[in-house]
Amino acid sequence: MGAPRRAADRGLRRRRPGPWPGAGRGPAAGGRGRISARGPAGAGRPAGRVNPRRAAYEVLTGLERGPHLETLLGRALASAPARERAFATSLIFGVLRNRLYLDHLLAACLDRPLHKLDPPVVAVLRLGAAELACMSTPDFAAVSAAVELAQATPARRGQTLINAVLRKLARGWRDVPLPAVEADPAAHLAVRFSHPLWLVQELLAQWPAEFVQAWLAANQAPSPLTLRANTLKTTRDDLAARLAGSAESVAPHHLTPEGLVLRGATAPAAELPGFKEGLFQVQDAAAQAVSHLLGLRPGLAVADLCAGAGGKAGHLVALLGGGPGLVAVEPSPGRVRALRDNLNRLGVEGARIRQADALTLTGLGPFDRVLVDAPCSALGVAGRRPDVRWRRAPQDPPRLAALQLALCTRAADLLAPGGALLYCTCTVTRAENAGVAAALLAARPELRLEWPQDLAAPLGACIGPDGFFRSFPHQQQSDAFFAARLVRKFRKT
């Protein structure tokens, strides 16, 4: 969704006509239509149904303890009917996408810092503020629902405070000004588009303010469902025809030849036609682009050193023509199981899977191509995964950059002469990305930055003057990715 209406945005209506759409890739992908102001479930809901506000509360407080958002959504909403699931997901993603703005509003109504309150109280306040400032819920119903939620949760000790703060907010949220853009552009953008101040400062240090504003605004819009047609089993056109009745629209993505964009999907991805048959992989267009950037052809020996659950591994095999040649390395036992299951679903045969740490694994190589889809701060997916905004801190990028450099150094050791290493991340910081690529090039003079000569025009357009690939939400309608392709020179004889 876009940012909620602020006092400064006179051209916008006070409230959206309904709740936020779901995340697009989560369980609320099919939840559409207006939800009643009181929500589809309350204290007297039928047995077996889910209270969406309570589910939203459980997810938001659970995030503070560390589990991934997808895990929490699955636990809270697995048994929820579509209507409750849609409303709960709207609340969850609405709070996550607008958290800093909601905190800004709440701060104007509190006599103490928000972080001094108990986390359960903060969660209920944010949910209530979201319904007041951004949704179609009438003021009295939003306040009443928040107090009722507090009574049913550990926030009950703060219900008097919650009632008073939200009543005050209902009367005056429209008059709370944003930080002045002239005085502090970074603070203005951070609050307006609900991104951490340190991240906005990082972006403004690299790009013009207008560019950053468009980027942040794009992050506020719900992400559509992006699929990669599995060309081992189907074509993009055939898959689009198969899915035509399963979404409001199905259209090709311009960035890759396999990409499809579904808007208004009628079911979660795993329930769409063709998923169980392995006809597609849920995969952002920028993630799809990565495999094309390697420059693959049948017969090459390829290593995926950070294979994860196998989204890119399946694509690599498809671009290799379906034959053997891929070694997928992943240290996590759980992810290795997911990797095997995913490759089996996609019909991938011949890939070798090694459960190991790429930094210490021996007996590999040489390879013609090595992919390092490195562990990173993941700030490039802050639109699709708004929880990432609040999980990262300024000290994370330098720490992760050191790991990325170590992985790339190991990958360089595995390259055959003339072989290519592709280092990529889904993040946007200088310590990672260009910083890591520059450090690797400085330490390994046998490497040079080089892209395939037959790179498709949409991908080539993402390569900047510094020679690195970057995608952006507001330009490519994808996650923000970075990539550098480094080729090992042949030794002179």
Image: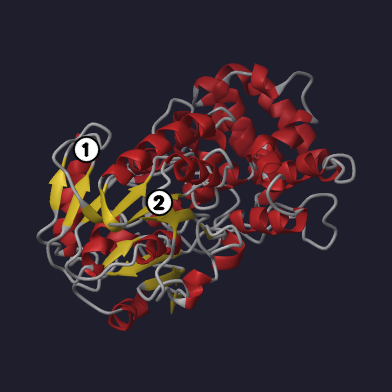
Query: Which residue is located at x 49 percent, y 54 percent?
Result: 481
The N terminus lies in quadrant: bottom right
Apparent side of residue 169 relative to residue 180 in the rendered image (left or right): left
Q: Which residue ends up furthest to the left in the rendered image? A: 350
Circle 2 sits in a helix, a strand or a loop, which is it?
strand
Apparent side of residue 281 relative to residue 322 in the rendered image (left or right): right
Instruction: Name the disc covering residue 334, or none.
Output: 1
**Whole-percent x and y of residue 392?**
53, 33
Residue nearest the viewer, comparing 371 with 368: 368
What amino acid does circle 1 point to? Gly
**Whole-percent x and y of residue 382?**
54, 47
Instruction: Name the disc covering residue 447, or none.
Output: 2
Instruction: Name the disc covering residue 310, or none.
Output: none
**Whole-percent x and y of residue 486?**
40, 54
What amino acid does circle 2 point to? Leu
**Whole-percent x and y of residue 278?**
20, 65
Apparent side of residue 259 relative to residue 430 in the rendered image (left or right): left
Task: Give above or below for 58 relative to 457.
Answer: above
Query: Which residue is located at x 27 percent, y 79 percent?
Result: 235
**Can see residue 40?**
no
Query: Which residue is located at x 27 percent, y 57 percent?
Result: 493
Q: Please identify the quarter of the rendering in which residue 241 is found.
A: bottom left
Q: Please identify the quarter of the rendering in which residue 34 is found.
A: bottom right
